[in-house]
Image (cartoon, helix red, strand yellow):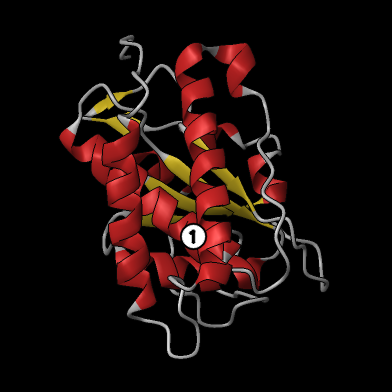
Amino acid sequence: MTTKQSIAPDRDTLRRLFDEAVNEINQTRQDTKLTTDFYAKTGNAVFEAGYLALSDYCMGTKASQRLHVVSAPAGGGKTSFSYALMLAVTRYAERTPDAPYGCAFVVDQIAKADEVYRELNALMPGKVAIWTKDHDAGSTKPTKVVEPAAQFTQDQLRLYPIIVVTHAFYNGARGNKAHLIVRNGRLALNDRALVVVDERPEEGGKPV
């Protein structure tokens, strides 16, 4: 296991990578411009909360357990800016060996997980994994998502810098498989550095 303590990212560099990711995502949107004044406020809030979370992670266990909440109206762009933050963290870590590493996007429902995976994988192909019972590599009869975007084993999650899972799995008996992360071929001592929790649960069945 690696034991080297992560160092908080350089704020200006991470912000530049965040803004670049926002522009990338913005180009894929037909009816939403993330660079308007309205959305920019949400973007700033997401970045600040994310940077505080990464700083806490680098400070140690107790600090890393704190939650940083971003309040914004539905349609305010929180999900898109969260994607941008995860892309920025991943790209920063790829060029900075002692930077915080590993992101998880945690949602309530399997269908939402599939949607998030498709969007993230389009932005960073090959860097994203997903696991739900429908997205399990051994699943032959998916129920919530008849044609899952991809399928992985739980043990494969640790090999990807960004993962998408449900609340039930992340907090469940096997949730440690979503916490673990391999970096440079070695299992890291610490869990994933950034966990984004979707706070808008959807109705319709028990997630796994």
In the image, what residue occupies the spot 46% across and 72% down? Answer: 34
Does residue 80 appear left or right of residue 20 in this picture? right
Position of residue 176 relative to residue 6, above or below, is below
Instruction: Give the quarter of the figure containing the N terminus.
Output: top left
Mark 1, residue position: 81
- Can residue 138 be spotted in the picture? no
Instruction: Give the quarter of the figure containing the C terminus.
Output: bottom right
Residue 110 position, x and y percent, is 64, 66
Residue 168 position, x and y percent, is 72, 48
Position of residue 171 relative to residue 205, above or below, is above
Residue 9, quarter of the rendered image:
top left
In the image, what residue occupies the spot 49% across and 60% down? Answer: 81
Using the image as rendered, state which of residue 150 and residue 74 is in the foreground: 74
Residue 84, quarter of the rendered image:
bottom left
Q: How many marks?
A: 1
What's under tag 1, amino acid-wise? Phe
Residue 129 position, x and y percent, is 41, 55
Does residue 42 appear left or right of residue 96 in this picture? right
Position of residue 58 relative to residue 93, above or below, is above
In the image, what residue occupies the spot 34% across and 18% down? Answer: 7
Using the image as rendered, state which of residue 24 and residue 146 is in the foreground: 24
Residue extending farthest to the left is 95
Residue extending farthest to the bottom is 30
Q: Residues within 10 Å of mark 1 (few under 14, many from 20)?
A: many
SS of the residue under disc 1:
helix
- Can residue 18 be spotted in the picture? yes
Position of residue 110 relative to residue 66, above or below, is below
